[in-house]
Amino acid sequence: MLGLTWLDWILLISLISFLASGLRKGFFVTLGAIIGFLAGGIAAFYGIPLVSTWVTNPGWRIFWIVASGLMFILIGQGIGMAIGARIRLWLNFPVLKSFDRLLGGIANTVMAALVISAIALSAATMGVPWVSQQIADSRVLSTIQTWTPKPITKFVTEARAQVMGQTIPELFEPFAPQIEAEVPEVESLGSGVDAAADSVVKIIGTAYACGVNQSGSGFVFAPDRVMTNAHVVAGINEPSVTTQDGRVLPASVVYFDSVTDLAVLQVPELGLEPLERGEDLQRGDTAAFLGYPGGGSFEAMGAVVESLSTVAIQNIYGAEPSPLRIYQLAGEVQQGNSGGPLLDARGKVVGVVFAKAKGGAEVGYALALDEVNQAIADSKSIREAVPTGACSPH
């Protein structure tokens, strides 16, 4: 009906009820609830990691993370509403009360929409394909997320990644001198990078043995074949792939190498154009890396090559270093970019992002074509799913 899903109707009814509640409570009570909600959210942001370390049982870990988060938020919201109600009692003028109700309705509806957006963003990365598909199909959620300010979306994705223990591997300090050149805006790199975007996908799944959800990026390199990092799918039996047009597809891991941190997924009926491979870049060359930082929306970012070198890198479990050919990049690599392609200015693959530098420097690392080409060759004839090892500590 009207092109809306059952989830859309539930969300519309919820938003209307929040509007009615805001009109009834008024602006000051609603504002108190919002401030209390935010204060509780901040308390949860700092408190939940402590809870996560106290609960060692993976089966109970997610339950107590969610329960403690709700407790912080509800307590903060209750205190804020009580303070707002006291302030509202001082408004004895009918005109002010009418204005108070109108603003209350607007504020409550906007706040509800932001909370719905945050919950949807988090639920979409839980690794449950049918949930992700319902969220992707919702027109109401799509509209809300379009209007949600980017800083809020970024905060939610970063907070969720920290709370749920999702991080991108952090290697040593930069091994090559950092370059002074300004990192280019991705728009300046040409149409080739834009054209490659449709072939970059989001990968999500649940590592049940560790009680964590994992998300990363990947790219199509052959028909129905996606390359990503091994640490993105480590410990996951049923990964799923989300395309930019909202399709959520089941995948199977057919190649997994914990040494090079590369994996290949078979995705039936993916139907996306494979990306071409380019040639090695040199120091000072501009590039772009594409992916889904924080498990959120697609982003393309510019980068500058600082080095292409052979470096001893530990495997995804932090042991047994092996010599790997890698790029050092000037660029803001984030959790969720793992497994995404490094592209040259023509939009051709020259590497796979896999880590960032320690110490807060805006430096990232990507596996070079030597490693990528070897993984493609080794996985070419494999059709059956392979074990994905234990959960990665990253």
Image (cartoon, helix red, strand yellow):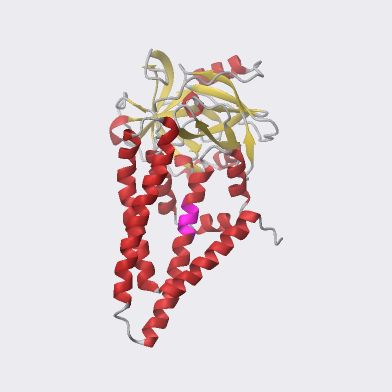
Residue 135 in view (yes/no): yes
Q: Quadrant of residue 219?
A: top right
Frontmost residue, 315 versus 283: 315
Residue 234 lies, with reference to residue 214, above or below; the image says above
The magenta stretch is 113-118
Q: Quadrant of the N terminus?
A: bottom right
Relative horizontal placement of residue 229, taking residue 382 as reference (left or right) = left
Residue 59 lies, with reference to residue 132, above or below; the image says above
Q: Position of residue 85 (x, y in %)?
A: 33, 72
Q: Quadrant of residue 93?
A: bottom left
Frontmost residue, 95 versus 173: 95
Q: Position of residue 175 (x, y in %)?
A: 31, 23
Helix, strand or loop: magenta stretch: helix
Q: Residue at x 36, y 46 (%)?
A: 68
Residue 354 lies, with reference to residue 62, above or below; the image says above
Q: Residue at x 51, y 39 (%)?
A: 126
Q: Residue at x 62, y 30 (%)?
A: 251
